[in-house]
Amino acid sequence: MRVYSLNFWLLAVWRIASLSAITIPVATPVAIAETTNKRMILPGARAQALGGAFTAVADDASASWYNPAGLGHLKGPGFSLTVNNYSRSRKEISGITANSKISENSASIYPGFAGSHASFGRFTFGWSYFTVEQQNTDESQTLNIPASSSASAFEYHRSELTSGNLMYAGLSGAFSLGKNFSIGASEFYYRRQKQTALKERSLFNDGVFYDSFVRQSTSNEGTLTNAGLMFKSDVFSLGLSARIPKALSDMTDFETSSIISTGSSPELSSTDGTTRREDELIVRTWSLGLAIRPRPWLLFSADVLHYPATKTPWASEGGFDTIAVTDWSSGIELTAGPILLSGGLFTNSSLVADPKPSLVASPPGKVDYQGFSAGIGLKTRQSETQLIMVRQRGTGQTQLVQGNLNLQDISIETQSFSLSSRYLF
């Protein structure tokens, strides 16, 4: 999520030092938290219940995302659907001042996953549509900044409206190389849209104030190619896949305005422009998965995901590099008659290095998550229906206050609930 922030302490020091001419820099776009992570929402029914450990399982339409080669082992048509999706998140940022926190809450109902597949001899084709990130924030809050030896007391008012999502739609195909081996590929189109409006005010005790308003609109588009291999036997399976994205456009338009009032004539300033902050990070993903079924009623699965380091092509326009990151996920599934129980654990690490405070513009915040999933449902010979919960908790740091060479601590919790079904005809 991108946030524009007021420089508390520069304003406070300025208030004591001078009530006349002063220049305060206009806020510039800041990216923190969600834009540096990959797995905020896990697409697919069974994949979601297994915590995303699906590279070596890949036995429904969501294989197009995790490992399209899995489609080559499916016989007959099938359909997968995730509905009634609800997500909520809570973010707390501390360290701005002693004993103060900024809290943000977001809640959304969003389309989850829909896809189907059909087999024609050794060939299997499929399509899928899904959301991997959703946000809807409407917050208004006030912090009382106490007086200190170097700054006078003032109030900080903040009001933010943010909405946005990231969706994928694509086609996939797989080819069976015999009883045990298959290959496959998918081609996706992605689109991210996000709008943010942020208003801030610092009001000093004697009526001196600083007002700032920012409006931002982000629209990113691109393609993603996914290719995979799979070996599958009656007891275990191995899967390997690679996702390669390509940006078609990556633009953020912004407008800012500010008013500084010292009790005489207010000083006005405004600006607008375009920047590239890579809301949809252009990173490659390598996935290696193993799944074991020691009994017909028991399944274990595990994935290792690697994201190589990348260099931004837009370093002079607000883009940022990513670091090499390795995540993992594991899942378990138990069947007792018609009852299906599933669970999973996973990590979701930030793709950027530790933030380095700057007096000019804040770097992206770094938040590393750990999460788990749990599902309960009913299973028949041709269908599965599960109620699934996925929860993540992340901690990290960011430089929220521009012009202040300090880092703030971030704590974020997200939860999502969905009703998912798979059908084989």
Image: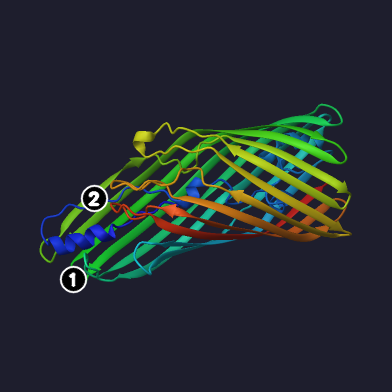
Q: Residue furthest top?
A: 177
Q: Position of residue 254 (x, y in %)?
A: 34, 47
In the picture shown, does residue 269 fall above or below 143?
A: above
Q: Looking at the image, do the residues carrying marks 1 and 2 touch, with CB atoms under 8 Å apart?
A: no
Earlier-in-chain disc, 1 versus 2: 2
Q: Position of residue 384 (x, y in %)?
A: 80, 54
Residue in view at x 85 percent, y 27 percent? 178
Q: Position of residue 107 (x, y in %)?
A: 53, 62
**Mark 2 Cα shell of 10 Å, populated few (<14), some (14-19), many (≥20):** some
Q: Position of residue 365 (x, y in %)?
A: 43, 50
Judge whether residue 56 can be spotted in this image: no
CA gap, disc 1 to disc 2? 21 Å
Judge whether residue 241 can be spotted in this image: yes
Q: Amino acid at mark 2?
A: Pro
- Taking the image as shown, residue 116 lies to the left or right of residue 151, namely right
**Location of residue 259 by image quarter:** bottom left
In the picture shown, does residue 342 fall above or below 143?
A: above
Q: Secondary structure at mark 2?
A: loop
Judging depth in this view, the residue of 150 and 180 nearest the camera is: 150
Q: Residue furthest bottom?
A: 205
Q: Secondary structure at mark 1?
A: loop
**Location of residue 59 by image quarter:** top right
Q: Which numbered dot is residue 317? A: none
Q: Which numbered dot is residue 207? A: 1
- Taking the image as shown, residue 242 lies to the left or right of residue 322, namely right
Residue in view at x 35 percent, y 37 percent? 317
Q: Which numbered dot is residue 25? A: 2
- Taking the image as shown, residue 13 lies to the left or right of residue 72, namely left
In the picture shown, does residue 157 fall above or below 274?
A: below
Q: Amino acid at mark 1?
A: Gly
Judging depth in this view, the residue of 224 and 347 nearest the camera is: 347
**Mark 1 Cα shell of 10 Å, populated few (<14), some (14-19), many (≥20):** few
